[in-house]
Amino acid sequence: MEYFVIIISAIFVSNIVLAQFLGICPFVGVSGKLSTSVGMGGAVLFVMTLATMVTWVLQYYVLNPFGLAFMQTIVFILVIAALVQMVEIILKKVSPPLYQALGVFLPLITTNCAVLGVAILTIQKEFNLMESVVFAIANAIGFTLAIVLFSGIREHLDLMEVPKGMRGVPIALVVAGILALAFMGFTGLV
């Protein structure tokens, strides 16, 4: 039951983007097309899960035993940066169109505070390794759900007649706010 609560909470109740407002840059920047949103969601899932596993192990087997817990943020950022470089190299070889579509936003996963936030939250919540992995995967699914929903709405808005002053970023931000409010309705679930 505990894993179920972690999953539902991370995806819907405390959605990393729509409730905690972490990872807004790729959320707004990559959500113009559904295909790039799905690709970004997959990349974030991979990086967030691996980063959480590696940082959890480093925290409990290196930083804490050697009294280096104060180095947590720097070490976590270095781990995330290395993993993003690995994803970038793999995507360039495996899927050049997706690599091109993600463009500058792929390296931005390094500074995506959602990835760092999840890694730090697993330590703060004192999750064990399995709970940390479930938490990371659920948060990545929540990120992907939010960005895919948002990109679908944005693609639909491109077909609609929007007042001139609201076209582009203004209507996107209004929609993001409404989407965040909709997700707040899940607050009573857990």
Image (tube, helix red, strand yellow):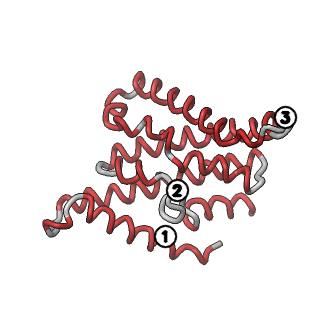
Q: From what the image shows, is residue 38 above or below residue 188?
A: above
Estimate how packed mark 1 is, as few (under 14), some (14 to 19) or many (20 or more) residues with alpha carbons within 10 Å.
some
The x, y position of residue 66, in whole percent, is 84, 34
- Which label number is shown at residue 147? none
Asked where in the image residue 56 lies, by quadrant, the reply is top right
The residue pinned by badge 3 equals 66
**In the image, what residue occupies the spot 83% across and 38% down?**
67
Q: From what the image shows, is residue 56 above or below residue 148?
A: above
Q: Which kind of residue does numbered mark 1 sit on?
A: Phe
- Helix, strand or loop at mark 3: loop
How much space separates mark 3 and mark 1, taking CA atoms? 41 Å
How much space separates mark 1 and mark 2, taking CA atoms? 11 Å
Give the foreground label among 2 and 3: 3
Q: Are marks 2 and 3 in contact (CB under 8 Å)?
A: no
Q: Which kind of residue does numbered mark 2 sit on?
A: Gly
- Which label number is shown at residue 142? 2
Estimate how packed mark 3 is, as few (under 14), some (14 to 19) or many (20 or more) residues with alpha carbons within 10 Å.
few
Q: Residue furthest top?
A: 93
Asked where in the image residue 9 lies, by quadrant, the reply is bottom right
- Helix, strand or loop at mark 1: helix
How much space separates mark 2 and mark 3, taking CA atoms? 35 Å
**In the image, what residue occupies the spot 47% across and 25% down?**
90
The residue pinned by badge 1 equals 183
Q: From what the image shows, is residue 144 above or below residue 105?
A: below
**In the image, what residue occupies the spot 60% across and 33% down?**
78
- Helix, strand or loop at mark 2: helix
The x, y position of residue 174, in whole percent, is 32, 68
Tell which circle, 2 or 3, labels the residue nearer the N-terminal end: 3
Quarter holding the C terminus is bottom right
Q: How many marks?
A: 3
The x, y position of residue 144, in whole percent, is 47, 51
